[in-house]
Image (cartoon, grey):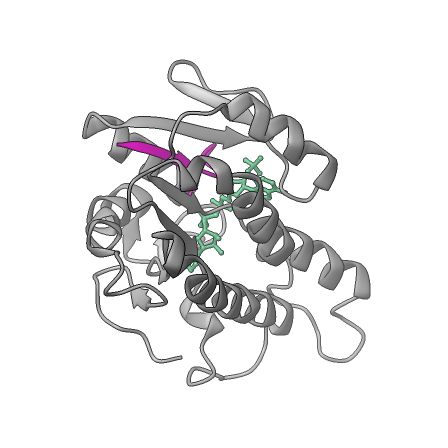
Amino acid sequence: MSVLVTGASRGIGRALYDGYLARGETVTGTCRGDPPAGGRWLRLDVAEPAQFAGFARSFGDAPLDLLICNAGVYLDKGQDLDGGYPPEMWAQSFAINVTGVFLTIQALLPALRAADEAKVAIISSQMASDSNAPGRSYIYRASKAAALNLGRNLAADLAPQGISVGVYHPGWVRTDMGATRPPRTAAQSARRRVQPFDALGPATTGCFETWDGRAHPY
Ligand code: NDP
């Protein structure tokens, strides 16, 4: 199976990259800086639209069975409602968490179409859910809600082409983004994380699920 993980330099993306490598899959990771030693890496800053054509060319013609859109940012942690949440922060967050996801999928459509029953997994968050609205982090919540909406609509359009799309909450995970308090490390989450991706298919396309395979309320 051929797998590509965006934002695989660290955190959940790196754990997913390592997890699939350990399973013997053919894995490509994307990173913005110097690639880690070993394995197959492509450079991609998902907020730079000009990079996508070259990125797709570098990936090549090989079929892609599973694309995991993991790269993401949470820039507005702790912002103040009065005077915080600057427009540049909205623009940068949406460029990475929403437009970046769309452009990644769009760039790799030929490779996904070349596979039998390809899958796209979008890493969103429980903070995308309208049923989980305690306030704060408006930019992150809105961007992850948009990624959820994007995934569900792409699922409808890509189903006739045999491509399934799922949207996932990876759990609260100890990474640079998740900070030090969460109960799980990225490696622990990623091990369980691959199970719902295995279950993704035509019958479940358009799903929004938690890291342990349970349906998440929209
Ligand atoms: P980290 O901050 O640890 O890692 C983020 C990854 O995204 C890095 O590899 C980073 O690359 C990459 N990235 C950031 N911006 C860009 C960009 N412009 N182009 C390409 N890659 C980029 O985050 P996590 O591992 O914690 O999060 C991974 C995903 O899981 C995110 O989508 C996040 O929203 C989601 N999530 C995480 C939770 C948690 O508790 N950790 C909870 C819910 C959802 P670089 O090293 O170059 O910066």
**Residue 3: within the magenta?**
yes
What quarter of the picture does the N terminus occupy? top left
Q: Is residue 181 visible?
A: no
Residue 94 drawn at (x, y percent): 66, 59
Query: Which residue appears at 50% of the width and 25% of the height?
Result: 59
Residue 75 drawn at (x, y percent): 63, 57
Query: Which residue appears at 79% of the width and 66% of the height?
Result: 86
Q: Is residue 108 above or below residue 152?
A: above
Residue 200 drawn at (x, y percent): 26, 56
Would you identify the image quadrant in which residue 10 lies? top left
Along the line of sight, the residue nearer the viewer: 59 or 48: 59
Q: Is residue 192 visible?
A: yes
**Residue 172: within the magenta?**
no
Q: Is residue 43 above or below residue 78?
A: above
Query: Which residue appears at 20% of the width and 25% of the height?
Result: 24
Would you identify the image quadrant in which residue 68 lies? top left
Q: Which residues are magenta?
A: 1-11
Along the line of sight, the residue nearer the viewer: 127 or 121: 121
What quarter of the picture does the C terminus occupy? bottom left
The residue sitting at the top extreme is 38
- On screen, residue 54 versus residue 123, left or right, reads right
Query: Which residue appears at 51% of the width and 70% of the height?
Result: 149
The residue sitting at the front extreme is 160
Along the line of sight, the residue nearer the viewer: 114 or 190: 114
Q: Is residue 194 above or below residue 207?
A: above
- On screen, residue 145 versus residue 139, left or right, reads left
